[in-house]
Amino acid sequence: MSELQRRRIRSVKRVIKEGRQGIVQVLRVNQRKGYIDLSKKRVTPDQRPAVEDRWNKSKAVHSIMRQIAYMSIHDKDKKKRDTSYSMLELYKMFGWKIATDYGSLYDGFKACMNDFDNFVKKN
């Protein structure tokens, strides 16, 4: 991480810790070396709520997709099914299309819940 805070810091360990999640901005990507330069400093306070909201929605969608993948493998009696789908296959089958059509998969699922018949007709 190349830019941590706007003010001077004494210890980098107090600002960032391994395994901790935080909101950062991508500055550069060096594919040859496999490096990503990140900035915590360039994220403004008014950007944080929108990013946190998008993150929470993405986590909810990922949980739903994981549950669908699990249910495609196991039936209600926890027995293996003949056909099963990985999460990647589910995203390829309908996830990416719905995300493109509705702006995000979360909004697509929301539209499905609010008006299932129109959702099915559209997709």
Image (cartoon, rainbow, N blue to C red):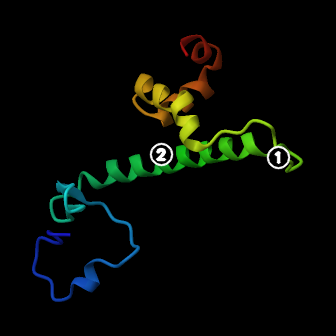
Determine the image quadrant of residue 64.
top right
Task: Give the residue at x 67% y 41%.
Answer: 68
Image side of residue 58 versus residue 79, left or right = left
Closer to the observer: label 2 or label 1? 1
Specify the farthest residue to the right. Answer: 77
Task: Give the residue at x 59% y 25%.
Answer: 112
Task: Give the residue at x 22% y 56%.
Answer: 25
Query: Crowding near pointer 1: few (<14 within 10 Å), some, many (20+)?
Result: few
Q: Position of residue 21 (x, y in %)?
A: 38, 67
Specify the farthest residue to the top. Answer: 121
- Circle 1: element type: loop
- Separation (CA) of disc 2 from disc 1: 30 Å
Query: Crowding near pointer 2: few (<14 within 10 Å), some, many (20+)?
Result: some
Image side of residue 21 versus residue 79, left or right = left
**Vertical placement of 30 versus 85: above or below?**
below
- For badge 2, the amino acid type reads Lys
Image side of residue 118 versus residue 29, left or right = right
Q: Which residue is mark 1?
A: 80
> Which numbered dot is residue 115?
none
Q: Position of residue 120 (x, y in %)?
A: 61, 16
- Circle 2: element type: helix
Q: Which residue is mark 2?
A: 57
Q: Position of residue 22 (x, y in %)?
A: 33, 65
Badge 2 or badge 1: first in the primary sequence: 2
Please say if the residues under marks 2 and 1 sit with CB atoms less than 8 Å apart: no
- For badge 1, the amino acid type reads Lys
